[in-house]
Image (spheres, rainbow, N blue to C red):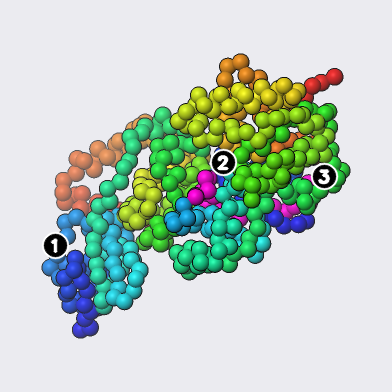
Amino acid sequence: MKTLAYFPGCALKDQARADENGTLAALARLGYEVREIPRWNCCGTVYSLAQDDLMRHVGPVRNLLRVQGMGEGRVLTLCAMCYGTLSRSARFVEDPERLRRINAFLAPDAYNGGVEVVHLLTLLRDEVGYERLAAQVKRELNGLKVAAYYGCVLLRPREYAVDDPDGPTVMERVVEALGGGAVPFPERMECCGAYLTVTQKGVVEGRVGRLLRSARAGGADVVVTTCPLCQFNLEERRPAGAPALPVLYLGQLLAWALGADEPAVGAAITGISSGVRHG
Amino acid sequence: MDEVTVFIMGKGYRVPAGLTIMKAMEYAGYRLTRGCGCRGGYCGACATVYRLRGDYKLYADLACQTTVQDGMYIAQLPFTPAERPAYRLEELRAEGQTLLSLFPELARCVACNTCTKACPQKLEVMDAVQASLRGDIPGVAELTFDCVSCGLCTMRCPAEISHHHVWQLARRLNGAYLTPRAPHVAQRVAEVEGGKFRAELDRLMAMGKEELVAAYKARDIEP
C-alpha cells in the first residue's frame, strides 16, 4: 500500500459524496492508503487574483501546511475547483517574499513550501498508468458511451492544466482504460456557467443545453466530470428539451468498473445502469 | 501587599497583584451591572481585550478568569452585536446546507484562524466554521460544546461571522434531529404528566415554614 495525503473539499463531504465514496473505494483497489489531511479548511473555492491581499491566500496555504504536518510532500484532490485553487496557491507562495509574509501571519506555524498538488486524473495517468488501470477492471462497462467533460479549471489557466490545454486526452484515456467508449464531444472544454447559477440561471441553462446537445450528438449515454459545480449545473440547470443525460463523477465510474460494492458506488450503479445500452 | 499597575479604559490604577481583571476593576471603583454575570467562567458576559506593554498582540479573555499583570491595558466588551436570523427549528432539517443558508457569511471565511486565537475557552473555532461550511452539524456541535457565547471571536472575525448564533443552531439541530432519543426522558415526562409526584408536591405546598425547614434539613442527600 502506498500512502497518499488527500484533500476532500467541502462539496465532496456534502453534495458530491458520491465522488468521494467512489474514488476512495477505487483507490483502495489500486493499492493506495488514502489519508485525509487533518483539520483541513475550505480551499477558497475561487482562486484570489488579488496580489496585494495575502489574507485571501491564507486558506489554501494553511491546507498545504497541514499536508506538511503529515510529513507528506504531495496532496491529492478530486474536485476540479479545489485543484485549481490549491495548485495555484502552491505556486503563488514559491515566491519567498510572499511566503515570508504569509508565514508571519501563520506564526507560530510556518509553511516551508514545496507541497505538490495532484489531481486524480494525473495520478491515474502518471502513476497508476492506463495499462495497470485497465488490468484492474472487474466489471464491464459494455462500451458505455461517455462524454468526458473537462470544463474550465482542469485546463485553465494553461500553466496549471492537468493535460494539454488545447487538446486534452487524459479523461478519455481513463474512460477507455475502464472499458468505456469516449465519444467526440467538441464542447468538452466549454464553461458550464459556473457561479452564474446563483444570479443568472438563464445564462447557465443556455450553456448547459448546448453542452448536453453536443454530448448527445456524439452518441453519449452519460457525461462524466470531476467538478461538483459542473455536475450540479448539468443536472439542475438543464433547460426543457435538452437531453437528460446522467451526469456522473469520475469516481463513480472508477468504482463501478473496478468492482466496488454497494454502498460505495451507490447512485453510480443506478446512473451507469440507466446509461448502459443493453443488448 | 504586592501591587501592579493596570490601565482600565486608558486610566492607570494600582491594584493588588493576584486579582482577576473583574476584581481589579471593582477595586478601582467600577460598579459592574453589565458585562458581569456568573463570575465563574460559565456565562460569557465579561469578554475583555487587553494588551501588555511592549507586546504587539491583542489578547482576549474573560475578566473573571484572568489575573491582572503589570502594564495591562484593559477594555471590556460587555455585548457583541451579532445578527441572528429568525428561524423555527421544527421547519429546519439537519442537513448539509442548513447552516450556510441561514448564515451565508460563513462562506466569507478565509481560514485566517483569528477566531481561534481569540477564544477564551480554547476552542478550535475556525475548525467549527469549516465544519459548518461543509454541513457537518455533529462536528460543529462537538467542537463548540464548551462555547460560552462571549462573542470575542465574532468581534475579531474579518469575515463578520456571528459565530455563537451558528453554533447554537448547530447544537439545536444536533439535539433535535441527530442524537439518539433518550427513552428514560419520555418515560419520566409520562410519569410527571401521570401525576406520580402530585401528592408529594401537594404535601410540601401545604407545609408551614418551620415544618418545611425541618423537612429540608432531614432530606435524603445523594452520596
Badge 2 density bin: few <14, some 14–19, many ≥20, Cα 10 Å: many
* Residue to which mark 3 is pinned: A130
Quadrant location of residue B193?
A: top left
* Residue to which mark 1 is pinned: B31
| Residue A44 horizontal/vertical position (percent) | 51, 48
* Residue to which mark 2 is pinned: A11
Residue pictured at 17% horizontal, 67% vertical: B26
Residue pictured at 17% horizontal, 60% vertical: B32
Amino acid at circle 3: Tyr
Relative to residue A204, is residue A118 depicted above or below?
below
* Circle nearer the viewer, 1 or 3: 3
Question: Do discs 2 and 3 share a chain?
Answer: yes
Relative to residue A145, is residue B96 depicted above or below?
below
Residue pictured at 18% horizontal, 68% vertical: B10
Q: What element does badge 2 sit on?
A: helix
Q: Residue furthest bottom?
A: B1
| A43 falls in the magenta region | yes
* Label 3: chain letter: A
Disc 2 versus disc 1: distance between alpha carbons? 51 Å
Give the magenta-colored segment's residue range.
Answer: A29-49
Badge 3 density bin: few <14, some 14–19, many ≥20, Cα 10 Å: some
Disc 2 versus disc 3: distance between alpha carbons? 28 Å
* Label 2: chain letter: A
